[in-house]
Amino acid sequence: MTMEIVTQIIWLFVLAIPIACVSWTVTHEEIFREPHEWCVRHSKNDRFILSRKFFYLFTCEYCFSHYVTIAFLILCDYKLLLNDWRGYILAGFSLVFMANVYMSLFALLRQAIKKEKVEIEKIESETENEISKN
């Protein structure tokens, strides 16, 4: 069964959201800090290059998003433009791209929020110092 092109594009933009969410959460968030640090250590210190590369996959959101995408392709049976194996390939790389666009935008947003918090803390500190001087 083939989807209309508009439906396929909607799926592309929507399906990339949970892929980005899972990839970002596993590679960046506090809930996975200990396993992440363990993988970082192994990716830097293991004796064999294949072992180092394997563990690196769990520390890089771009790399990890490929594997999350494969899981979602299997789960949702999503194909893009073509209704055979080529549709899976196109869908896979397109989903990885869109998920990484979303993660980049999310990272920029988080950076802006952190910068704003630091600026607010600085202003509050300066205000407190002025009040304590008077």
Image (spheres, rainbow, N blue to C red):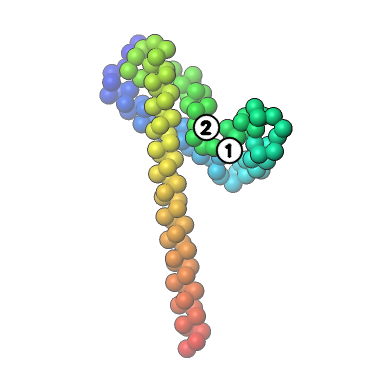
Q: Label 1, on which residue? A: 59
Q: Nearer the viewer, residue 57 or 88?
A: 57
Q: CA distance from mark 2 to mark 1?
A: 8 Å
Q: Nearer the viewer, residue 132 or 111?
A: 111
Q: Which residue is at a point 51% across and 37% down the rendered structure image?
A: 61
**Coordinates of residue 127 in the picture (x, y in percent):** 45, 77
* Residue 130 seen in render: yes
Report the amino acid beneath label 1.
Thr
Q: Which residue is at a point 52% across and 32% down the rendered structure image?
A: 63
Which residue sits furthest bottom? Answer: 134
Report the amino acid beneath label 2.
Cys
Q: Label 2, on which residue? A: 63
The secondary element bearing badge 1 is classed as loop
Q: Quadrant of the N terminus?
A: top left
- Classify residue 59 as left or right of residue 122: right
- Classify residue 45 as left or right of residue 62: right
Alpha-carbon neighbours of circle 1 within 10 Å: few (<14), some, or many (≥20)? many
Alpha-carbon neighbours of circle 2 within 10 Å: few (<14), some, or many (≥20)? some
**Are dots 2 and 1 in contact, CB under 8 Å?**
yes
The secondary element bearing badge 2 is classed as helix
Identify whether 124 is placed above or below 80.
below
Identify whether 33 is placed above or below 79.
below
In which quarter of the view is residue 103 placed?
top left
Q: Nearer the viewer, residue 20 or 54?
A: 54
Q: Which residue is at a point 42% across and 42% down the rendered structure image?
A: 104
**Coordinates of residue 5 in the picture (x, y in percent):** 28, 21
Identify whether 45 is placed above or below 117.
above
Which mark, residue 25? none
**Coordinates of residue 22 in the picture (x, y in percent):** 51, 35
Q: How many marks?
A: 2
**Coordinates of residue 77 in the picture (x, y in percent):** 44, 17
